[in-house]
Image (tube, grey):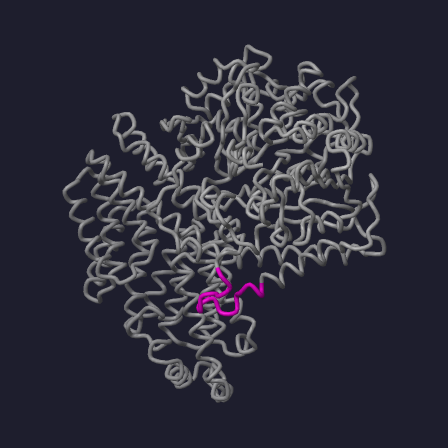
Amino acid sequence: MVGSDDARTTTPRRGIRAAIEKAAARRYAGSDESYVGWAEVQRHSLALEPLFNQVRRANDLGTAGEVAAAEELVQQVSGHPLATRIPLLTANIAMVRCIITGAQGDLEAAEQHALVTVGLHKQGGNLPAISESMEMLGKVQHMRGRNAEAYDTLIEALEVGGDLMYRLSRVRLEVFLMTIAFDAGDRARTVEHAMKARKLAKKWRCHIQHGAACDALAYLAMEDNLLKDAVRWAAEADRAYQREEGCPLPARLRHLIIVSALARSEGRTREAMGSYVHMMQGVSELRAGWGWRDAQAYFVDLYSEPEVSAYLTANELFVQEDELAPDAFAKLLDLGNRTSLRKMLRGELGLEEPADLGEASLTDVVALLGTIKTSEGSLAGEAPPSAGRKSVPQGASADVVHAGRQLAAAAYDRLETLVSLRFRRALEAESHGTTIDAREWAVRWSTHVLQIRLLTDGESAHVAGLWTAPDGLRHPFLHSVDSRQARMLGEITGIESLLSGTEAEPAEAVVTAPGPADGTESVRADAPKWKQTARFRHLAVGRAAFWAEIATILLPAGLADLLRETSPDGEVPKLLLVPDSYLWRVPWAALRVDPTHVEGYLADRSVLALLPSLSLLTDSADSPGSPATRAPAPGPDAAAGKAVAYLAGFNPDGLALERDALNAAYGTGVTYAARPADLLNALGPHRTPASVVIASVHGDNRPGLAHALILDDHTRLSAARMLTLHFPRILMINACLSAELDERHGTDPLGIPTVALCRGAETVIGGLYPLPDGQSQTLGLSHPTSGILTILYRLLAEGMAPSSALRTAQRQWRREHGPTPAWLWAGLVSITTQFDDPHRAHER
């Protein structure tokens, strides 16, 4: 925004009317009609002032990293009729959008917004404004890697602005020129611009830019091993930042990176660790304002290198047997995976929104949910689906269907923005100094807890984790991952970014499996290319050495040894996995901890359960909760033996097997939903209490709140729509990809499982990849998913805890069918906030 943070500017600190008068006096268009349309401005001056103020607020939020809030505000302003009739306002909106899209990593869009801003100001002839907009353009060009072009743009900005430039803009230009020279490896120019920026910043009291220049000088001194000089420059930067009230978070983060690296290079490991923790706290805060969108990947990658350094420093403490090492690992893992999803999605933030969010309120959320409900299909009057029907409703043209899908996509995107604002406020209300401690849950549930994260910085990769044993002892670990192993992880997770820059394994390692491995004819999802993926082939071929190496990468040595020595036929340990978004998609059950034994899978040697974030435990089912969002727990016998099932959309023989098993397990206690409306009614506020709700349907893998189940040919049920529903303690979604979470790096773990856990469920059982379904060419291997479920229904009806029941069902099915590839049985997973808790079992 033009001059919004400069003492010389008149917009809006000296009042918008004064700014408009000055703009008109310059006669921007050089004719009787001024650039801003003076007569029109006079008529609308009262309306313009709050609009400019709102744009300025959006600018401040965007610059500070709260991009979701900034986007919400600028969207409201851009919808006003004056936004396109007053060029000065249009230019300021374009500049804020440049900040937002640049922060989100959409640099092409950012450059277009910058060009619009430059063009509008050039029409008006306001030289300081032209200069500032060119500064923004040069910054985007630099971000796009066009350093020489960016340097020329910034030099031109200096020439255009001349003595009329805003002081802050003048100093910022020197900082940007310094940064470009640094990236180009031109040390002489880097020092030249840094010293000039320092001199001007001290003169004009531009404290943030003063600190940035000193940070750069400290880094250069550190590279030259001139540690005394580096300490001196870092101290001067620190004093400069302290003079700025409300120092922007990105500036603080940059300074903490320098301070941490300097302390580490001097051997002050504990001090370095403290600074890195503060840095990661800042990254966590900054990430929270960005919403659930692809942009977070760009942001998280920006700090990937110092995050790796933070874990390396924590590991140095561990090697030195420093007692702070486990705490350091715990803090870093917590900050990297912190979320307030349960608190936010259960609606416990109150109905009042902060004033700076304008019209963004729960009313908007409700309206968007209505749009999503309409776009996902009517819930009334639908006939039960039949296999093989087309997904386009009768009488609907392709254009209408396409328009409906576009409307839904826009609604999901808008909803994620609004929800992320509430998420930001939730985090602000929490103490960032408190680490969620896995020890409480490990001891209470008598389980091993494994928090694990994959770190990449473009040059190296590491797996960092913390294993907490049932006795409360914590064991940090850090495994280096070479390019071949990174590709292995990319192949079994299906995440493309892990495959870039790595060499493929030899072709014979991933050849298509023979008939028995992939003989089932279909899967429970629209996934026509599934069997062409490396992920499928590894699960189908089942090379023990491959999956054993994956286990050594992901499991700490002590835990792997314990599991290897465990008898699969005896009492096995419980293992709660808390992976990041990359590692969530690992088929954990298929890992081989004992490759020499037919029952050497991780699922044989432990009871497995997954959890998206330890934060979901801090507001567990033992907490009172909100009556409006959580159903009251049923009485001792109120829901015992009761089940609601909706079976639709795939192989009828498999569905018949499930129906027979449900009848045998629950008898008259099972109720079948014939239509989507019946299922939704069973999850509404006036539902009949049930111990379990079962949905055997098709799924999809759209990210975030768009993650959906296909209930029939006309009706989808998305995670967004599930925000209005209530779930029983056990929810079984026997659909492909129903256990998926948003895999976009840096985003919060949002999807059907987390929404269900935040809306009443304690355990969700779902599919981690396309589940096999249908007839098989291999005798005895037809309907493998239905076969496992028929066993599982009986065990649940008998009262066995969900995660243990799933393990037992998978192993029993395998024993009945002999050695089988993992893809046939390892796709169903248990996701829980009450890991087979004996306290809960006793209560029921």
In the image, what residue occupies the spot 44% across and 26% down? 482
Expressed as whole percent of the image width and height from the top left, the position of residue 102 reads 46, 56
| Most common SS among magenta residues | loop
> In the figure, 232 relative to 152: above or below?
above
Q: Residue furthest front?
A: 636
- Residue 841 is left or right of residue 325, and the answer is right
Q: Residue 85's quadrant in the figure? A: bottom right
In which quadrant of the rendered image does the C terminus lie? Answer: top right
In the image, what residue occupies the spot 72% across and 40% down? 698
Numbered-mark total: 0
- Of 591 and 506, the residue lying toward us: 591
Expressed as whole percent of the image width and height from the top left, the position of residue 685 reads 65, 54
Q: Is residue 499 visible?
A: no
Q: Residue 5's quadrant in the figure? A: bottom left
Q: Residue furthest top?
A: 596
Which stretch is magenta?
350-364
- Residue 472 is left or right of residue 85, and the answer is left
> In the figure, 27 relative to 599: above or below?
below
- Of 8 and 343, the residue lying toward us: 343
In the image, what residue occupies the spot 49% across and 69% down? 358
> In the figure, 425 relative to 331: above or below?
below
- Of 159 and 255, the residue lying toward us: 255
The question of residue 352 being in magenta is answered with yes
Q: Is residue 629 visible?
A: yes
In which quadrant of the rendered image does the N terminus lie? Answer: bottom left
The question of residue 212 being in magenta is answered with no
